[in-house]
Image (cartoon, rainbow, N blue to C red):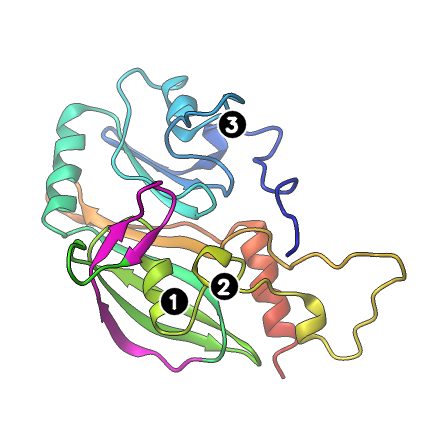
Amino acid sequence: MTELSNYKKPPKTLTFRELIIHEDDNYVIISKPPFVSSLPERTKDKAISIQQMAKEEYDDIQLCHRLDKETSGALVLAKNSEAYRNMAIQFEDRQVKKEYHAVVNGVHDLDSISVFLPISVLKDGTAVRIDKTAGKLAETIFFTEKSFQKHTLVRCYPITGRMHQIRVHLQCLNAPIVCDPTYGGDFIYLSQIKRKFNLKMDTEELPLIKRVALHAHKIAFRDLTGSVVEFTAPYPKDFEALVKQLNKHSS
């Protein structure tokens, strides 16, 4: 297996301000980069988190939800208690609409395919499994955005918000996310998709993306006025480059 631990690090220079895609009196919506935790980790290296970065800019700001460390995309923070309560109620009532994009192994034709399978967290807390006896309700709806030679770009709509829900539900469809060995996802290499690929001697080929290829692309909710607002987080460089290569060599 390719060793990627040396590559799974946040950018050396990262400021909270450059992550913002929208700000008003009540909310800040950011595009979270990969390899940055939403909340502080219980590790010795004291890696920076989104929460820590936000607290340096605002006194009372709170995260309204989380994204996995490797997952990039739209993340909502509340600037006051009323705004936080507004979001908490919508999450509890499953009124927040989220759209994720994932690149998965294999070619799949998914047209409003719903996976309705309960999930339980493993004892060590690092992964989940399908558990029809004691698992918690979980549902995700999937659509094929674009098919390539050996991979598929998928739109994912989680109805519930369980840990690793999208990842394990895609595994159930035999469509694991690339670079996600926890749930059966293989790495993706240029040599797999490019004809007449030549690798220089004594050179190790690295994957086209060095993390779970999952991106929180859009989020929609009701603001304090009751109006529905929607925000889009553009693909980060690594995800954009992956899709570009798949498009380029998909003929």
Q: Amino acid at mark 2?
A: Gly
- In the rendered structure, which amino acid carries the disc numbered 1? Gln
Q: Quadrant of the N terminus?
A: bottom right
What residue is at 26 percent from the left and 76 percent from the top? 112
Tell me: 31 left or right of 156. right
Disc 1 target residue: 171
> Quick check: marks 1 and 2 in contact, CB under 8 Å?
yes
Farthest residue toward the right?
201
Residue appearing at x 60%, y 34% in the figure:
11
Q: Is residue 169 above or below residue 67?
A: below
Work out whether mark 3 precedes mark 1 in sequence or the reverse, and give the earlier one: 3
Q: What is the quadrant of the C terminus in the image?
A: bottom right
Nearest to the observer: residue 70 or residue 128: 128
Q: Reply above or below: 251 against 72.
A: below
Q: CA distance from mark 3 to mark 2?
A: 32 Å
Q: Secondary structure at mark 1?
A: helix
- Residue that carries the numbered disc 2 in the rendered image: 185
Q: Tell whether position 194 is magenta.
A: no
* Amino acid, disc 3: Thr
- Residue beneath the point at 59% across and 37% down: 9
Residue 229 appears in the rendering: no
Give residue 68's quadrant in the image. top left
Find disc 3 in the rendering and name its residue: 15
How many residues crowd mark 2 within 10 Å: few (<14), some (14–19), many (20+)? many
Answer few, some or many: residues within 10 Å of disc 1's Cα (few below 14, many 20 plus, some between 14 and 19): some
Residue 202 seen in the figure? yes
